Amino acid sequence: MKRAKSTILYSLLVAFVGVLYTSCADKLDLSPIDYYGSGSYWKTEAHVIGYMDGIHKHLRDATFQHTFIWGEARGGALITSGTSADGMGMLYGDIKLQNFDEDHTGGIKKFGDIFGRLTNLNLFIARVTDATYMDDVKKGYYLGQAYGLRAFYYFDLYRTYGGVPLRLTADVVEGVIDPNKLYMARATPKEVMDQIKKDLDKSMESFGDNNSFDPNNRGNKKGYWSKAATECLMGEVYLWISKVSTGDDAANEANLEIAKTHLQNVINNYGLKMLDDFSSVFDAKNGKGNSEIIFAVRYMEGEAGNNNNLFTYAMATGSTKDNYLANGEKFLDALNIANTGSQQLEYKHEIYNSFDVADTRREATFIASYSKNTETKELTLRGTHVRKNIGYVNAQGSRIYCGDYIIYRLPLVYLMLAEIENMQGGDVAKYINLVRERAYSTNWDKAIYGYTNADFTTNELAILHEKDKEFIQEGQRWWDIRRMTLTKGGKHLVFVKEGSIGTDMPTLDEATEAHKVLWPVDKDLLGNDPLIYQTPGYATYKKAE
């Protein structure tokens, strides 16, 4: 990720500078400004805002892991190995191939380095809870963000690892330096989920009646956690635990009603509306924070760029530019990316071919490159290059990858509700068609392209495939095939061929690879922390005493 001056970090620095400035009349009274827990901090609302900005910056640093590594790479939509259409070597082969064991953790260590971020949230919660310089409404807004984000991180850990240590205090920052006191065993999955529920409830309680996306009028364009984000996460969490059992945390269908309530609240209470044009949702110049978005991680020219150049193409290899567009013209630099691309991640041709020609999402998501037969002039699909969310060309003629990573937007809510309807024997078509009608735009004809409610299996797969088209690159597919089932209460799609793309093999063999739905712990962590044990099912697993 591009490193540059960050306005988020700048806000945090400004807070410290403000403390320094107000004390400059008596330099002898200056506290060390490099001390994390300095008594000169946590004195004003500006300090709270600055720290929360820093928390969101740390979220941004982890967003590619959240969205791609944990949510997209394992979903089966990407070409697994070899070289891409532009001749570049593919990344993340072990993850895409489900090649996990004690020696292969996909480069992820120390539980994805999430616990440093949790420590920052824990300190924030402690300091803001005790703050006397803000009224309860303001404190509630900031604490609502913090509890929501802590639940968000722990849900990532829960779905990825199952049980993990439950750290709810900022021990290191508070002066605990004895490593023996800092060791902490993995809690059970149920204990982790119980804490996630508590944090979600606390977030809702803290936000109270504050349904605003930007109560401080900072122009954040939905780049900060909100009550709507908490309710969307609650829908996601309770839908998950209605269908997925993890260790001692058994699935309970009763959770569907809780999920449904919060997702319907998201639709009804926050002024959300789908845009008419699919491509406009990802417009990095004019579309940030649009009416469809619930929560997005913010990127900006001159501050930080995303990783979407990895899905485009590399002009330097010379292979793509000599291919052809669908109209028979030379591909050249069709997306005007110059030398900024490097296609080391590519979606399977089956994904591109699954779109109807009339579905506007196909061309809004991909630009295809073709080989041409020199004799017959026949075109053959060669590469799928992502054009969705690749930023813009700036005034200097450079491609800037500054599109936001959208965590939650309204179509996701509709399709989660469709999944709930399917579990409850309702009509899923109304939700699928809300999404599909926008996708087909002026081509929409319900008689041709509309979905009609069917049996459980047909509905479940229809929801999955609608999400396949709607959420390319948005980190949904792995979680979808983990959660969704072929029959009600039956096998999860990760274990059946119907959940796969371009192959008749399931993503995981249930008989020999069921443990791989959870990530292994790296050996370095196992060796350094005597209380941490391996994820169940892996060779070095030892049951906690």
Image (cartoon, rainbow, N blue to C red):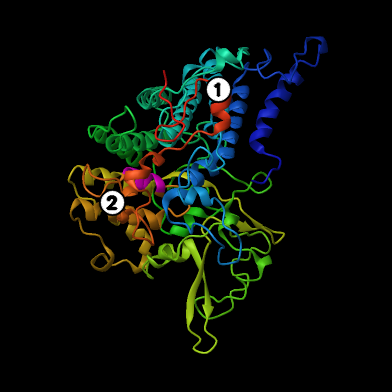
| Magenta residues (range) | 478-483
The rendered magenta stretch, by its main secondary structure, is classed as: helix
Q: CA distance from mark 1 to mark 2?
A: 47 Å
Quarter of the image containing the C terminus? top left
From the viewer's perspective, tell me whether residue 175 is left or right of residue 457. right
Q: Residues within 10 Å of mark 2 (few under 14, many from 20)?
A: many
Is 445 magenta? The answer is no
Mark 1 and mark 2 lie on one chain; the one further toward the N terminus is 2
Q: Secondary structure at mark 1?
A: loop
- Depicted 531 relative to depicted 317: above or below: above
Q: Identify the residue at the far bottom of this view.
A: 375
Tag 1: residue type?
Answer: Asp
The reply, left or right, for residue 532 in relation to residue 444 is right
Residue shown at 49% from the left, 45% from the top: 67
Q: From the image, tell me which residue sits under label 2.
A: 431
Q: Which residue is mark 1?
A: 529
Q: Is residue 493 above or below residue 204?
A: below
Q: Is residue 429 above or below residue 28?
A: below
Residue 481 seen: yes
Which residue occupies the foreground of this view, 426 or 500?
500
Residue 170 found in image quarter = top right
